[in-house]
């Protein structure tokens, strides 16, 4: 019987190893999935996006249409840890009609540790003061992915 137990143990170990490999592939797929949050309007942009667990910012895309005008668009972190940890992440000086925003975080910044990774409870805040409120329409897309 010892040989039998040994074989059973070996088979169980192989099964666990296969299961662990399958879980690792599933984790990688999950971490590569981009969740897109969208908003649109004709007033100022003051949007906050978050996930209920650790996440990373993948992209920001914003299109503007209507009368002419530009203003600064800022990205900041609103930290769940408190205002002492809030920080500006990025600013686009001239955003508006004929000046769309297309920010894609580079592949080198998508791996941990990344300055674009936020903790559960943190939010990314996007702000822009519409220079011609009601006459410039904007469409905002924010890509987020789960982080390990």
Image: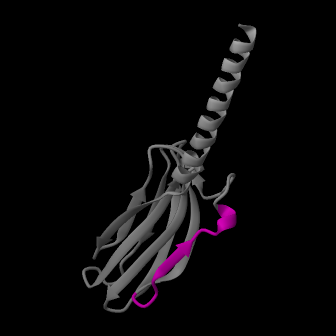
Q: Quadrant of the N terminus?
A: top right
Task: State how many labels appear.
Answer: 0
Give percent across and percent down for residue 64.
Answer: 37, 83
68 vs 99, nearest the viewer: 99
Q: Say which quarter of the image contains residue 132.
A: bottom left
**Does the magenta run of residues contain 10?**
no
Q: Image point 52% across, 68% down: which residue?
A: 59
Q: Is residue 77 above or below residue 90?
A: above
**Residue with the most extreme top position:** 1
Residue at image location 45% in from the left, 81% down from the top? 71
Q: Residue furthest left?
A: 134
Q: Residue at x 44, y 65 (%)?
A: 142
Report whether 55 appears left or right of 134: right
Spot occupied by residue 90 in the image (x, y as percentages of width and height): 58, 69
Percent position of residue 109, x then y:
66, 63
Q: In the image, what residue occupies the spot 31% across and 91% down?
A: 67
**Colour scheme in the image?**
one colour
**Magenta stretch contains residue 107:** yes
Tell me: residue 9, above or below residue 134: above
Q: Is residue 123 shown above or below 107? A: above
Splitting the image into 4 quarters, where does residue 19 fall? top right
Image coordinates of residue 24 in percent, x first then y, are 61, 44
Q: What's the magenta region? A: 97-109
């Amino acid at each position: 019987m010892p040989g039998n137990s040994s074989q059973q143990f070996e088979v169980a170990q192989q099964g666990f190893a296969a299961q662990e490999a399958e879980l690792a592939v599933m984790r990688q797929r999950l971490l590569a999935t981009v969740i897109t949050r969208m908003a649109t309007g004709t007033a100022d942009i003051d949007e906050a996006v978050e996930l209920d667990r650790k996440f990373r910012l993948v992209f920001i895309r914003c299109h503007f249409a209507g009368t002419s005008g530009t203003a600064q668009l800022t990205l900041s972190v609103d930290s769940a840890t408190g205002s002492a940890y809030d920080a500006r992440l990025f600013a686009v000086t001239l955003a508006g009609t004929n000046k769309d925003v297309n920010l894609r975080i580079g592949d080198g910044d998508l791996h941990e540790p990344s300055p674009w990774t936020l903790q559960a409870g943190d939010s990314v805040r996007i702000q822009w003061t519409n220079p011609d409120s009601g006459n410039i329409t904007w469409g905002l897309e924010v890509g987020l992915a789960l982080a390990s």
